[in-house]
Amino acid sequence: MRFYFLGIAGTAMASLAAMLKQKGHDVWGTDQGIYPPMSDFLQQQHIPVWQGYDVAHLDTPFDVAVIGNALTRGNPEVEEILNRRLPIACMPRLIREHIIQNRKSIVITGTHGKTTTSALMTWILDVAGKDPGFLVGGIPHNFGYSARYRDSEFVVLEGDEYDSAFFDKRPKFLHYFPFYLIINNIEFDHADIYRDVVEIQDNFRKLLRIMPSRGLVVANGDSENVRAVLDPIYSRLQTFGQSDQNDWYFRILSADENGSHFQVYYRKQVWGEFTIHLPGEFQIRNALACIAMAAEVGIPRDAIGKALETFRGVKRRMDVWGNFHNALVIDDFAHHPTAIRETLEALRRKYHPRRLVALFEPRTNTTVRNIFQTELAEALSHADAVLVAPLHRPERFPPEERLSLSQLQNDLTQLGKTTIIIEDYQHILPVLEDTLRSGDLLVILTNGNLGGVYSRLKEMVIPPNRGSIKPK
């Protein structure tokens, strides 16, 4: 078949495009504002991509137009496709029809940690020789690509709660019909499509209603929001977390800049000891969910341990770039207050006593609005200095609904944090040059491209193997 992707540079869209090509289909697409890592990924997969939207693209015949959820009515190609009555599909439906088929899907859900947990679950299965297919919303360092089609027993999918397309407002994960399901956490997010956390929970309840009775749900029992959706439940259930009230729980034995060594318990009995070379307690929780699921599908403990010790994380998740103005630069995807706080806390512990400078871009439909006005200040206060990039496309919302950058600055200043509001993306590099000191740690917090400055900054960074970082 011939698939034409509109919005192909989205992480999940690009991943599906690659999987369909691996199955032997013809695949190409278009997008605007394409940037790494997905632009590099598409090029590596030899998938042709047009820049921008033009109805002339539709002159190239295709069997199905796959329309990403970033596109809306009014897009010239969308309007022409509808006028011509050409066949369309949303990405999750094609995943169900062409990738999952009759395989046992392991679906990873939750507000935070989906990508890392999906990548780790895949790596455990791979180390154990299961050769799983997978589709992850990022690029795992252990694989170097975000998707792989395999005609094997398992397929691991990152299950997003965001909607599927402008013509299908159901969450993506409802298309995936999981046999195995991980629920990491549930918090309010995606304010453009959800009114509150209760509405998000309702969709998780719908997901649980389509779980087979023989399937397994591995759920974060420490989260009140997660526990609230588990009654009633129609499949088998195991809980995980730090509390010993869970089926699976952990105790940290040691932690340093190289990661954590921890003990795992299953129903009050010691089950094993493991090491993961990623900083932060939240990474242990991600690992524990994978351990519980791996045990369910019969992965030996030694294979689980080997996989955890050799797991190298995901691009744009605490990704070490190198040296910029003698400061160590780390790139991270965190944009929700909880993820920002956990990332900064983990980096603080790992890189103490470096001065921690956070460059934050309010970009999502939630963070551009003032929904998390107070929470963002609290989360960012875990840095020593905060640089705030311009609001991304603020015209989407009326002034009274937008995040107040002046208020954010005032709140952070009252908390004793040096705070600079950057009014133009082109001022980011000069502000960094003026702000950074020798030995600082700079963490970039964005799920975007800093108005195009992201790639320029990365090009200016000296990789770790090409220059030393002077200690503070």
Image: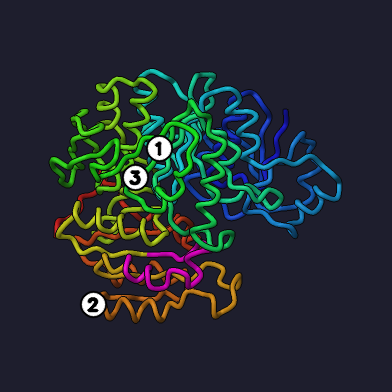
Residue 362 magenta-highlighted: yes
Q: Which residues are magenta?
A: 360-379
Q: Is residue 108 above or below residue 148?
A: below
Tell me the amino acid under the disc marked 3: Gly
In the drawing, does residue 36 fall left or right of residue 469? right
- Who is closer to the viewer here, 147 or 54? 147
Mark found first going from the N terminus, 1 or 3: 1
CA gap between label 1 and label 2 equals 37 Å
- Who is closer to the viewer here, 283 or 58? 283
Residue 168 magenta-highlighted: no
Mark found first going from the N terminus, 3 or 2: 3
| Residue at the (40%, 48%) spot, across then down | 227
Describe the element under mark 1 as helix, strand or loop: loop
Residue denoted by label 1: 140
CA gap between label 1 and label 3 equals 27 Å
Q: Quadrant of the N terminus?
A: top right
Q: Is residue 379 above or below residue 130?
A: below
Q: Is residue 76 above or below residue 214?
A: below
Q: Position of residue 384 (x, y in %)?
A: 24, 68
In the drawing, does residue 435 fall left or right of residue 174? left
Residue denoted by label 3: 221
- Marks 1,3: beta carbons within 8 A: no
In the drawing, does residue 467 fall left or right of residue 256? right
